[in-house]
Amino acid sequence: MKVAIDQILNRTKMRLLLTQTTHADAYLEKLINEAATHHIGGLDNFVVSCETLDIDCLKARLPINAVDLICYSFPDATGCSGCCIDCMNPHNPNATCSCPNWFVADRNILTEFCGSGVSAGLSSNFFDVQNGYIVFPSSVTQPTVKVWYRGLNIDEDGIAILDESWERGLSAYAAWQYAIAHFKSYASEQRKLWQMEWTAQRERIRGLALQRDAILHKPEVSAIARAILMNPMVMTNRNG
Amino acid sequence: MTLPELRERVSSAPTGGYITSDSRMDAGYIDNLIHSARAFIACERWKQYGQVPPAYYQKFEPDFSKLAQEAGSCFTVFYDIPQIIALDGRASGIGFIGNLNGIACQIREVSSLGEFASFQTDRIMKSGRKAYLINGQGEFTVWFKDKIKSFQMEIIAADPTLLPLYNVDYDDYPMDISDIPKMETYMLQGSFGLIYKTPIDRINDSRDVTVPPQVNP
């Protein structure tokens, strides 16, 4: 079950005896979000999304939650996206366009694309990603680009989508960090306990994420197992 | 216990001795001392127990003035905010801020524009649309995607009588009843400590007016 960040914030304030003031709310919220987006690293922290981005002054602003880019394509490109020398040469209208239809950021995925017979190229040969923007060469004339990316699972406010089972761990992390910043107000033993609790909870959260992932993919595994049982020769001997 | 009752109780306490006709027993002065002692006790309780009794908090809803707003701005400013005490360096006297335009939610408090700017540097959170309140001197600035017309707060005001919902004659003074003896002690030890003054005799005659009146047994 997913919960709002306020629930975890209130739990943290209870730990820190700060329930009667709102003074530290903004800082604690930042700490909780930081732990959820960057430190937990569970499998369900990330989502694969796609978005059509506007190209303005040869730049397209990546979505804020983007972590890894998977691939791009120009939605209205019909074989030519204006990205290569041949496309931009007005003196040679008969030049054969060498632009790929897909620009792939990951070499493994590129292999899959090419293996499937799709026209694809490594995106780093064509575009750069700088400071949250895709920077295109001046030859690109397309108004939009479609991007597939692996992103953080966040809401419209930039807050991580938080699972109920993370509450204890995230509140321990925020309390520990806050207590370090205000070390005179909290005993060192208390700070140490919160740190240990966070570490233990983080491992538990990662374990649960793996477990959940295995359950989600269980039908797939059982289907493969069933296929092996039904036709062992085909499954085990791919040349057969 | 209402403020007039409290004032009566406190001013009756310092009895005996010889007090000259100064202004220390004026109602305004006593009220001021009561407010200061209340703030001091609230801070002391916070430092000692990390908690302040709920009786100290008062509900407050700032007034929205459309004419006071800047056109096209991303923030709403509320003026005429009563002074709020600071419990210590890491806690203000604001217990709750929320219910924006009647919708249940919490607002994040930041103490200055600089602190707000530092939160906005976060790559992911900066594009968010959460509401932030900057606690300025006598005014609040609320940053939100829309204009804010109302929100609610629970505060420990430095002068509780300035809050619009507080009725001096009928409402209980926002203080825990068990703290009143402590307040008396502070006031008697400090500002009400009896000062024995000798009136100045400016008239050069044989009568000595500086001698205290003798009480007949």
Image: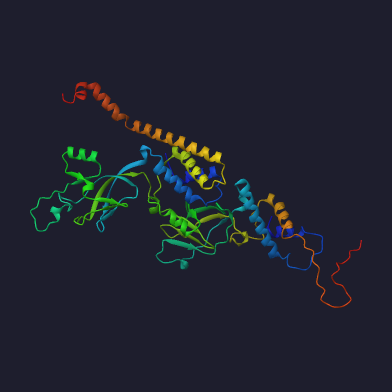
Which x, y percent locates residue A130? Answer: 30, 52
Horizontally, residue A172 falls left or right of residue B178, namely left
Which x, y percent locates residue B153? Answer: 53, 55
Which x, y percent locates residue B216? Answer: 91, 63
Horizontally, residue A128 falls left or right of residue B149, namely left
Q: Is residue B53 visible?
A: no
* The C terminus of chain B sits in image quarter: bottom right
Which x, y percent locates residue B56? Answer: 62, 53
Of residue A195 and residue A224, the one placed in the foreground of this image is A195
Of residue B186 and residue A50, the one placed in the foreground of this image is B186
Residue at horizontal 47 percent and vertical 51 percent from the top = A26
**B210 in relation to B134, above or below:** below
Horizontally, residue A188 falls left or right of residue B168, namely left
* The N terminus of chain B sits in image quarter: bottom right
Residue A89, image quadrant: bottom left
Q: Find the residue positioned furthest to the left.
A: A94
Horizontally, residue B191 falls left or right of residue A191, namely right
Of residue A106 and residue B52, the one placed in the foreground of this image is A106
